[in-house]
Structures are given as structure tokens and as C-alpha cells.
């Protein structure tokens, strides 16, 4: 059996490679989506950051635009990784999921490969954004604790991918994409510490934000930027614990749900759509 | 069920000596599946799709590159290697799907109506390719189809009605067992004509609104000339021909309880 399990590990690594490379190919081929993923955060940063910033009392040390940089980075990951994980639904609809299901991969393996590929897709987009931010001198490399920064971005990307996977295994088609947008992406983004410090929020919003795993991702990124404008809400250690716990539980749930689905009649009927008898 | 996608309600299935419910992943390594509908990613090229699928089976690029080229050549698709799948015709796409199904060198290939929705030329081409595949790769093909002429070259044909195998055997023996000759009468009003001739119901295969098929067994040979003269009025054509699998299928599916043998 040692032979079999070592072969499975080797196969899994190869499979992981092709799933990631497919995701990257698709990310780079959809030029408009890629462009949107870079323009969207810049609009937020300049329009919202500039607009809201102008009505806040400004002092020389802190400014609003600087304060939302971690939140905007988080938003890029949220859109990048989460949308990429949501393509699992597209795979189900278009039939590509058949290739996964009939391969020797376990459902856990399929979900893990999706997690890895969407995490990387999100990180690639955030790297693109960072290049722009560094060039425009909005973020100063000197103020960044680089290892913690990379770690924070990765954890946030993992968390966003997990949110996407959970949504993907729970939804049947992309028809309700608008609903996903309204009920998942926007609440996750707005009800977090991305745009404002959590402490000042009214009680209900405060508790929702505390329960939102995305808040902890943004918070960890805040910890890695030592600008006076950026004030973290939680400690580093709680951030890491929450992010990891959420990812592990979310991935376990998604794999379980996915395996239920692949043995249940529902998915089989999708797979053999059009069959008459 | 055989392909591990469904769990059997009872009993067990062995494929190549491996229990399907015990070790589905190992079984999936040994079988290839081609569905009625494409499983390809339309936005990727033919080769990218094939490499992706090979990768899911744990096969590295350099291990399958040559095999992909050889298979594409077999299906006359070598010049479509880098074309996006979305640009291929239905027949070509089906061919790529079949290549996808055999990439990992399965022992058994399941084809679920591989030619449904294709024009007659593409269907013939696909069958030529599948024949070549069977010869080259020592492969067992399990085929489900509604086009029975496609089942004629098979070794074993089974008819399944409501989930049960109602008849099984080599196509030749099924046909022989069924009848020696078939009389096909094309007409507008089969019910009226049927009243005129004296043939047991069990020998009438079908009586839809436009034709009568009569199965002729050697031992109970009806008088063909008599039938012809009786039916000449009202019949558009009268044909005596060899039976085929379509007749067997019609007979099996139209047969009601206690009728026929």
C-alpha cells in the first residue's frame, strides 16, 4: 500500500500543477477581467480614498487613502481568489468538472487543487496591483515588513478562495451570480475592517465584522504595514488562528459537500444531461 | 455505476478484478469515459485540454506529448493541435473527447452515445477512428447507443429495457434467433390491413401508423405470396428482407407481457 499512496501523492502533485496552470492561463487570457481586477482597486483607492479622505479631518500624519491600502489589497484578493474559486460552478455547468470527477483524484484532492489554483490566481492579481502602487509611490516599500506582508496576503487569499469554494459547492448554477455578488462579495467586503476601523462601528455591524474571516485577513496585512495611518483591530496571533481555522474547516466542509454531490443523483444528472432513458 | 459515478443499490461490481465500491479511484485509473456531452474546456486549445486531462490522471507533459500527437494523427486532427476547442466542429470535438478518454491508456472505454447529434459523415469517421483505436490499443469498448447499426460490429449486444437486460448475445445470434426473414409492408392504415391477414400477433413486430413488420420464422413460415396478394391493395410497398438489430429492438420493446417468445 506504501506504493499506492506514494504514487497517489506523485499523481496529486502533477494534477495540482495542471489545475494551477489552467487557472493562470485562463486568468491571463481574459484580458478584460484582468484589467478590471487592476482598475477596480485603483478606482476605490483614488475615488473613495480621495473622496472620503477629503471630508475627514486631516492631519499631517495620517490620511484615509493610506489607511485603506490593506483593505484594497484584501479586496483585490477577494475578487481575484473568490471569483476564481467560483469558476468551479462554471466547470460544473460547462462539463469540465467531468474531467475532474472521472480522474483518479479524490474529491478532497479536487477541492485542494481548486483552493491552490484560486489562491495563486488572486496573488498574481495582487502582485500586479502592488507594482502599480509601488510605482505611484502610494505604498512605501520601506514601511512594509515583507515576510509578514507576503504571509498576510497568502492567508487572506486562502481565506477568500475558501469563501468562494463554499459558495461554489452550495450553488447550482451561475444564474444566481448577481445574488452571490450581493449576498456574499459585498457583505464580506463592507462588513469587515477593510474601509473603516472595526472598533468604531455600531454594535451589530461590529459583531458581524468580528465574525467575518475576511476582517482578519485585512488585519494581518495591516500588521505588516508600519504606517501611522494603519491601525490593526486584532492581534497577529488571533488573526493567523482565525484564518487557518476558517480555511481548514471551510475546505473540509467543501470537500465533504462535493463528495456528497458527486455520488448523489444531482451531479450525475448534470453529467449525463440530455440522456433520455 | 460501472464507472464509479453511482453507487450500486445492491451487489458488487468487479472491473479488472477491482471492486468498484471498495476502490473507485483505482477503477477510474483503468477506465475511460466519454459522455454524450463534451467535457472539454472550450476556452483552451485542443492540446491544452488533453495535457490538462492527462495531468489530472497524474501523467506529466513529457510522458504524454508523443501519445497525444499519435492519437491526434489517428483522428486526423494533427493540424488542430493548438486550435481552441470552441472553433472545432461537433465531430472534431467528439473526436477530441474520445482521445481524452483514452489518454491514460484505460483497459475499458465507456462510450455513451458517442455519435449522437452528428451528421452521417462525422459518424462514419468517428467509427473508423474507434475501430482503429480498438486495433491499436487492445481496448475493450462498452457502448451505449440509439443507432443500432453502430452496435452491429460489436462482440456482444445487450438490450436494456427499464434497467433490466432483456436480451444479450452476439448481434448475429440475436438476429438469427429472432427471425430468418422480415416482411416490411409500408401502408397508410396498418390496422385495417392487419385484419385481412391471418398472422399470429406474436409474429408482428410493430404496427405503428405507417408500416407493418412481420417476423418470419422458418418453422412457421407464412405464405408470403398470399400475404402479398391480400395486402397489395392499400400497401405502398412490400419488402422481404433480412432482419437487422433495429427489428430485434422494436420487437423487444413493443413486446407486451405474455406475448411472443
Image (cartoon, coloured by chain):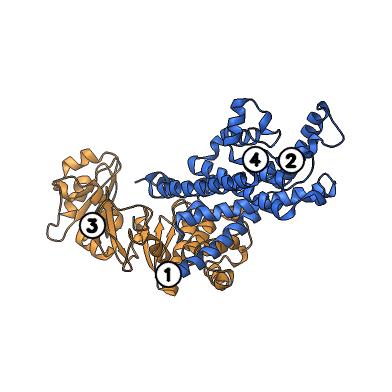
Chain colours: A blue, B orange
Badge 2 density bin: few <14, some 14–19, many ≥20, Cα 10 Å: many
Q: Is residue B257 above or below residue A202?
A: below
Asked whether the viewer can see residue A86, the reply is no
Asked whether the viewer can see residue A264, the reply is yes
Label 4 vs 2, first from the N-terminus:
2
Q: Disc 4 marks which residue?
A: A234
- Count of marks placed on residues: 4
Q: Residue at left 47%, top 69%?
A: A7
Q: Which mark is residue B167?
A: 3
Q: Check contact, mark 1 vs mark 2: CB within 8 A.
A: no
Q: Nearer the viewer, mark 1 or mark 4?
A: 4
Q: Circle 2 — which element?
A: helix
The answer to which of B163 and B250 lies nearer the viewer is: B163
Badge 3 density bin: few <14, some 14–19, many ≥20, Cα 10 Å: some
Q: Nearer the viewer, mark 4 or mark 2?
A: 4
Q: Please state the chain letter of the residue tagged with numbered disc 1 in the rendered image.
A: A
Q: Please state the chain letter of the residue tagged with numbered disc 4 in the rendered image.
A: A
Q: Circle 4 — which element?
A: loop
Q: Are the residues under badges 4 and 2 in a single subunit?
A: yes
Q: Is residue B31 above or below residue A214?
A: below
Marks 4 and 2, how far apart at CA: 24 Å
Q: Measured from the top left, where is residue B224 in percent x and y?
A: 18, 54
Q: Nearer the viewer, mark 1 or mark 3?
A: 1
Badge 4 density bin: few <14, some 14–19, many ≥20, Cα 10 Å: some
Marks 4 and 3, how far apart at CA: 71 Å
Q: Disc 2 marks which residue?
A: A41
The answer to which of A121 and A264 lies nearer the viewer is: A121
Label 1 vs 4, first from the N-terminus:
1
The answer to which of A161 and B101 lies nearer the viewer is: A161
The answer to which of A213 and B90 lies nearer the viewer is: A213
Q: Disc 1 marks which residue?
A: A4
Amino acid at each position: 500500500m506504501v506504493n499506492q499512496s506514494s504514487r497517489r501523492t506523485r499523481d496529486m502533485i502533477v494534477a495540482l500543477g495542471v489545475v494551477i496552470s489552467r487557472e493562470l492561463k485562463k486568468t491571463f487570457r481574459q484580458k478584460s477581467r484582468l484589467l478590471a481586477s487592476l482598475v477596480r482597486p485603483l478606482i476605490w483607492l483614488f475615488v473613495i480614498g480621495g473622496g472620503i479622505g477629503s471630508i475627514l479631518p486631516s492631519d499631517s500624519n495620517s490620511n484615509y487613502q493610506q489607511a485603506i491600502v490593506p483593505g484594497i489589497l484584501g479586496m483585490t484578493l477577494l475578487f481575484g481568489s473568490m471569483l476564481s474559486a467560483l469558476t468551479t460552478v462554471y466547470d460544473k455547468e460547462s462539463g469540465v468538472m467531468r474531467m475532474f470527477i472521472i480522474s483518479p483524484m479524490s474529491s478532497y484532492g479536487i477541492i485542494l487543487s481548486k483552493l491552490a489554483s484560486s489562491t495563486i490566481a488572486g496573488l498574481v492579481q495582487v502582485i500586479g496591483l502592488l507594482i502599480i502602487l509601488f510605482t505611484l509611490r502610494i505604498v512605501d516599500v520601506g514601511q512594509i515588513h515583507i515576510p509578514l506582508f507576503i504571509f498576510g496576503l497568502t492567508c487572506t487569499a486562502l481565506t477568500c478562495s475558501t469563501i468562494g469554494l463554499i459558495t461554489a459547492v452550495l450553488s447550482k448554477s451561475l444564474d444566481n451570480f448577481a445574488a452571490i455578488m450581493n449576498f456574499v462579495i459585498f457583505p464580506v467586503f463592507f462588513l469587515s475592517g477593510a474601509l473603516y476601523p472595526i472598533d468604531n462601528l455600531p454594535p451589530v455591524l461590529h459583531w458581524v465584522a468580528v465574525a467575518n474571516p475576511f476582517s482578519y485577513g485585512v488585519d494581518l496585512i495591516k500588521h505588516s504595514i508600519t504606517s501611522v495611518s494603519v491601525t490593526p483591530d486584532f492581534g497577529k496571533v488571533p488573526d493567523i488562528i482565525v484564518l487557518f481555522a476558517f480555511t481548514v474547516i471551510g475546505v473540509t466542509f467543501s470537500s465533504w459537500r462535493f463528495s456528497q454531490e458527486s455520488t448523489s443523483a444531482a451531479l450525475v444528472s448534470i453529467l449525463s444531461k440530455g440522456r433520455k432513458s | 455505476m460501472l464507472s464509479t459515478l453511482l453507487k450500486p443499490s445492491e451487489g458488487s461490481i468487479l472491473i479488472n478484478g477491482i471492486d468498484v465500491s471498495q476502490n473507485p479511484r483505482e477503477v477510474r485509473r483503468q477506465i475511460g469515459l466519454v459522455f454524450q456531452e463534451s467535457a472539454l474546456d472550450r476556452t483552451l486549445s485542443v492540446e491544452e485540454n488533453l495535457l490538462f486531462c492527462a495531468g489530472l490522471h497524474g501523467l506529466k507533459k513529457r510522458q504524454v506529448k508523443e501519445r497525444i500527437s499519435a492519437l491526434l494523427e489517428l483522428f486526423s486532427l494533427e493540424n488542430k493541435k493548438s486550435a481552441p476547442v470552441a472553433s472545432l466542429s461537433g465531430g472534431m470535438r467528439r473526436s477530441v473527447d474520445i482521445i481524452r478518454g483514452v489518454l491514460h491508456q484505460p483497459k475499458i472505454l465507456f462510450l455513451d452515445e458517442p455519435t449522437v447529434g452528428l451528421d452521417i459523415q462525422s459518424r462514419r469517421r468517428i467509427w473508423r477512428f474507434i475501430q482503429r483505436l480498438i486495433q491499436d490499443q487492445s481496448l475493450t469498448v462498452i457502448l451505449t447507443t440509439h443507432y443500432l447499426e453502430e452496435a452491429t460490429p460489436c462482440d456482444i449486444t445487450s438490450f436494456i429495457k427499464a434497467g433490466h437486460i432483456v436480451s444479450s448475445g452476439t448481434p448475429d445470434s440475436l438476429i438469427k434467433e429472432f427471425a430468418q426473414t422480415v416482411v416490411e409492408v409500408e401502408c397508410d392504415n396498418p390496422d385495417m390491413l392487419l385484419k385481412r391477414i391471418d398472422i399470429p400477433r406474436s409474429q408482428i413486430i410493430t404496427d405503428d401508423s405507417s408500416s407493418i413488420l412481420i417476423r418470419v420464422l422458418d418453422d412457421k413460415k407464412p405464405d408470403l405470396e398470399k400475404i402479398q396478394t391480400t395486402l397489395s391493395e392499400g400497401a405502398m410497398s412490400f419488402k422481404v428482407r433480412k432482419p437487422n438489430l433495429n427489428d430485434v429492438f422494436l420487437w423487444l420493446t413493443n413486446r407486451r407481457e405474455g406475448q411472443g417468445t
